[in-house]
Every structure is written in C-alpha cells, then in structure tokens.
Image (tube, rainbow, N blue to C red):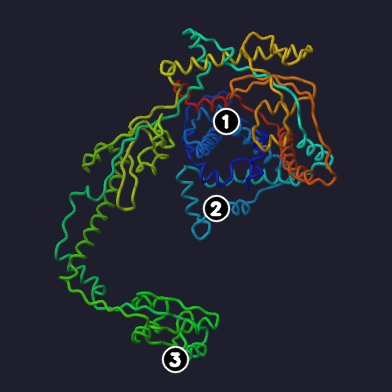
Amino acid sequence: MISFFRKFFQSKLGLGLTLVFLVLMGFAFASADVSNTSVFGGVAGGDRVAVVGDRTISTSELSLNVTNSMQQARQENPTLSMQAFIDAGGFDEVLDSMISRAALSEFGTMLGLRVGSALVDSEIRSSPGLQNAAGEFDVNAFRASLRQRGLTESAVRDDLALSLMARQMLLPVAYQATLPESVARTYAQLLNETRIGRAAAFPAEAFAPTGAPTSAQLQEYYDSNRARYVRPERRVIRYATFTAENLSDIPPVTDAQVAARYQADAVLYRERQQRSFTQLVLPTEAAARAVIAEVRGGTTLEASAQSKGLAVTQVEDVEQQDFASSASQAVAQAAFAGNDGALVGPVRGSLGWYVLRVDGVTRIAARSLAQAQGDIRTTLETERRTQALGELTEELEDQFARGRTLDEAARELGVEIQSTPPLLASGQVYGQQAQAPAELARVMNFAFEVPEGEASLDEIAAGQQFLIYDVGNIIPSAAAPLAEIREQVAAQWRRDRGMAAAGQAANRVLQRVERGASLADAVAQETANLPATQALRISRRELQRLGQVTRGTVLFFSMAEGTAHRVAEQAQDRWFVIQLDDIEVPELAANDPLIAATRAQLGQTLGSEYAEQFVAAVQQAVEVERNEDGIAAVRQSLLGGNNPAAN
C-alpha cells in the first residue's frame, strides 16, 4: 500500500482515480457491460465487495475500476493482459485504494468536512484534457466523453468528490514531515559507510540434472508454472484501402456546368492587380507627415522608421480587397491608386496612420471561358470525386453498423483484401521484429477492442485515402501448448532443479560457517565444482554510482556485522552465501551538507509513512467489512469466468 500513497503525493487529486484518469483513460468500458454480467447476480453476499462505514463498494464499481487501471497500464505496455495485470497485484491495489478512499471520505464526513459542488466544478474546469485550443473548458467535450463511455456526469462528480475529500484528509497529515537532525545524521553517515566481507557463489548449472525430465515430471512442472508461458493476445487484421480512383460511377463534367462555374466565379477571371508594399504605421498624423517629409528629403522609409525605434513591415502580392480587410478600405484605395514606387500617405487605418511605399505592381490579365475551362473542369472533377468519396464513406459506415461485411464492401469497391500475420496490440508481428503495415498504425488500438468479423472504416490521408478492415482471427492470451515449447520447459525445469539444489548447498555451507568454519573451508567441503570465494569491499556511495543494486547487495548492506546469510539471485541463476566481517563508518562534520539533504529526502518518505498509518487508523475507525465471495467473483469474471484459455 505504501507505493500507492507515494503515487498520491505525485498527483493533483491523489488516491487513484483522478478526473483526467476517469475521463481520458478510465472510460474504457461502459458500466452497462459490468452491471449486466450475470455472474454478479449469484454472488453470495449480494452485489458488494466491501462496506466501508455507511458506504457500499459494489462489484460493478470494482470491476470497472480494475478495467480502467489495466487500460491505463496498457499505455506503457500494450501487450498487457488482464491475467498479467492481476498476477502483478493490480487487482488488489485497486481494491485497496477504493477502500482507503471510501474510508477517508466517511471519516471526513464524521469530522464535518465536505466537498462542495463548486470545488468539484473547479477541478473539472482546470483539467487540461478537457480544455480547447484556447485553454478554456469545453463542456461539450466533457459530456461527449461521458456519453462515449456510458457513464453519467453525476457518477464522475461523486468519484471526484471522493478524491478531493481524500486530499483534504491526507495533505495536512503528511505536509512538511521532518526527521530529527540526530536521525538524519545517522542515515547520512550510512551513506559513507564501507562494508567488508566475502561471498561464495552456487551456480544452478553446477547442480542441474544432466538428463531430460520424464514426461510426468515435465507435465507436472508445466502445470505448476503455466503462467510463465502465457502468450499475449494476437489478432489477424484483414484490410483494404481505397481512394477516389476506385469510384466508377461519377458522372462527367459538362460544358454547361463549366460555364456556370465560370459565371459564378467571374471575379476570379477578370483583370486585376496584385501589389507589394513596404508599410509603416504611426500613432499620429503628425508623426506620419514627419516621416513622409524625411523620405522626400532623401531618407529611406526603413531608415526613418529605425531612427524612431520603429520597424517597417512587408506586404507581398496582395489584392485590394484582401488588403482592405487587414488595413482599411481607405488605406487600400490609396495604396492601389499610387504608381509603382510612389510614397502613399498618411492615411488612417485600423492600426493607426499608414505610410506606404509601392514596391511592385503585377497586372493579371482577364481570362475568357475558353482560357479557363481546363482549370475549371479539373476543379469540378476534383470536387465531385471528393464529394462522392465523402458520401461513400458515410454510406459504408452506416452499412457496417447494420452488419455489412468487409468482403461485401471490398467486392463493390473492386479492392483486394490483405491479411496481416498475427499482430500484438503494439503493432509488432508476433514472434518477429517486423511491424504492422503503416496504414494500420491509426487503428491498432481500436482493432484490439472490436469483436471478430466486425467491419470498420478509418481515414489514412484526410479526404483522399481510406481504410476498411476487420479482425479476421483472434488468438486469445493463453499458455502455449506444452508440445510447442517442450525444449524451453525442459531447460527451465533443469534450471529450477539446479537452483533448488544450489540453495540446499548454500544452506549447508551457511551452517558450517555458523559452527565456526571459514567460508572458503565450508565451500571446499562441497563435492560440486564451485567458484572460489570472492573478497568484498563496497561503499554505499560506490553502489549508488554504479547503480548495481541486487538482492545480494541489499542483503550485504542490511545484515549485522559478524553474520552470514544466503540469498538467491534468480536473474543470475545462482545462490550466494554472504559473510560480513567489518563495517567502516567515518564521522561527518557538524555542518556537512549531506545531513540537510538526507533530512529533506527522508522527510518526504516520512510523510508517506504518516499517511499510510493514518489511513490504517481511519479504516479501523469506520469499520471496513470485505465480502471475499464478491471479491473472488469479480476477479474470476475479469479473468473470463471458467474459460481455460483465459487462465
């Protein structure tokens, strides 16, 4: 639980389900999918997993929150399965956090604390995930998220109120927790200590059986370690792409339609001008006239502006109507009345008094219908293809929603369906380094949530290229059959047998050392071919610098001087017997900065410990009752009931 509370102090709302988690990551499954599960109706003890004071935590709440947490964890590990999440303790952590939060809310209510609707509104509005491009709260986005996930606004507000009550209760408990200086000095001295001893290694390979296991031994080992061999869910995606080129029934553009467009856009084909200017805007008419006088006296417009701490701006290839919209109608008229190279102004505009120099005049000749018809025809054809493509995609989405298959749509479009090899949720091809085709990148997450055979549509290039796809085959997460991984299981059986025997040898050596033998002599009495013992001299600072923290080093720096212990290093496939002979701890100066730094760092940990103890006391005060049958039912339901493939 302590890791949970440390996470609390790193978040704004604390204790698990913050608003952003609920709205952006948490709404992964609609609550109806949980409440309609028949499993909960038959749970002994009803539809609750715990009663905290007067508050009930339902089976549906627990199921939804565990699912949300697993989906959030999948952001870091896309191949994570519910089985793996639960095996790693995720289920228990979510349940503990829900009970803790409910207990804090009940206790706060007993003390007269409350969370008003205005505070909840404030937290919702300040959530970055619910703000638009202008940084303002977007209520439509908030409600759309709720509708999309099948939750109600009141449910989200209630949950957020729980988090805010927890924050009110815990922050004062942990705020600015401080260790006594004497304790901080002791810990600081430990950072400088050096430990001296010896270690003996007992590799698993020195004790592992050389022969193959029997079929019965292998089967028993496989059954006991089935979770080791669980393969992640894989999916085969069938897909096809199409563009406007796949549309065959677009009517041709007629001459009459070209002529009608020419008349509608006549302003584009008349004779017109584009001009470029150097522009200076001044606050008063007098200042503008002074600049004009300087320019006519031989100073450049740029130099005159610079002498006054101002800067000119360039306006390139603008037409009169466009220039009028940014400056003013009067400025545009004056600017387009002047000759090439003329100085224009002063003229009052939207930003002040304008002085302009005409830098260039481009005259664009009028175009007749005969001259423009090619461009117009191309434009109309493009518009028709785009419109037809948009209508087609809308129609396909409607048809897919009514059950139309990918094969039927592909036949109508005349496109070929392609199939991927089995893919992981990350987009990686299972068992290979290759990735899914680039056009599937946008749909990978969604493709791992839809049922098999349900066709969908997505956009690859905006308005130009589209993708239709379905999931052709779902290979659920399950343990690999023993027949396919026999050699791997046999190797791990030998390794585990070797580790067990190595542990027994390490225990024998440890007993000899405890009876007075030296570590080297105790090892020499073993019949296996073992490495020589190694001398150890390690300081904590050196250990921190190298970052090589193992179970062995943790043991070495936690055991008492003059003792010996054994420890298993699973990652190295070996056991160790470690003997600590001496501890050297140099004294620190009274003003050593390490003392203050240690005091500040441990103060944060102390605050977390205070919070943990406070929550434990609160849970006793409000009487927490757990329904183990209900908890077990939710766990089993999340794992797929009695489906062997899910276990």
Marks 3 and 1 in Cβ contact (< 8 Å): no
The N terminus lies in quadrant = top right
Q: Residues within 10 Å of mark 2 (few under 14, many from 20)?
A: few
Q: Does dot 2 land on a helix, a strand or a loop?
A: helix
- Using the image, tell me which numbered label, if any, was put on residue 91: 1
Three-letter code, disc 2: Pro
Three-letter code, disc 1: Phe
Nearer-the-camera pick, 467 or 581: 581
For residue 77, above or below residue 207? below
For residue 568, above or below residue 239? above
Q: Residues within 10 Å of mark 3 (few under 14, many from 20)?
A: few
The residue where tag 3 is placed is 296
Does 392 sit left or right of 281 as displayed?
Answer: left
Residue shown at the point (55%, 83%) measured from the top left: 308
Spatial CA distance of label 3 from label 2 is 55 Å
Q: Does dot 3 land on a helix, a strand or a loop?
A: helix
Residue shown at the point (33%, 76%) measured from the top left: 319
- What is the x, y in percent for residue 643? 45, 22
- What is the x, y in percent for residue 254? 14, 62
- Using the image, tell me which numbered label, if any, was put on residue 338: none
Nearer-the-camera pick, 72 or 172: 72
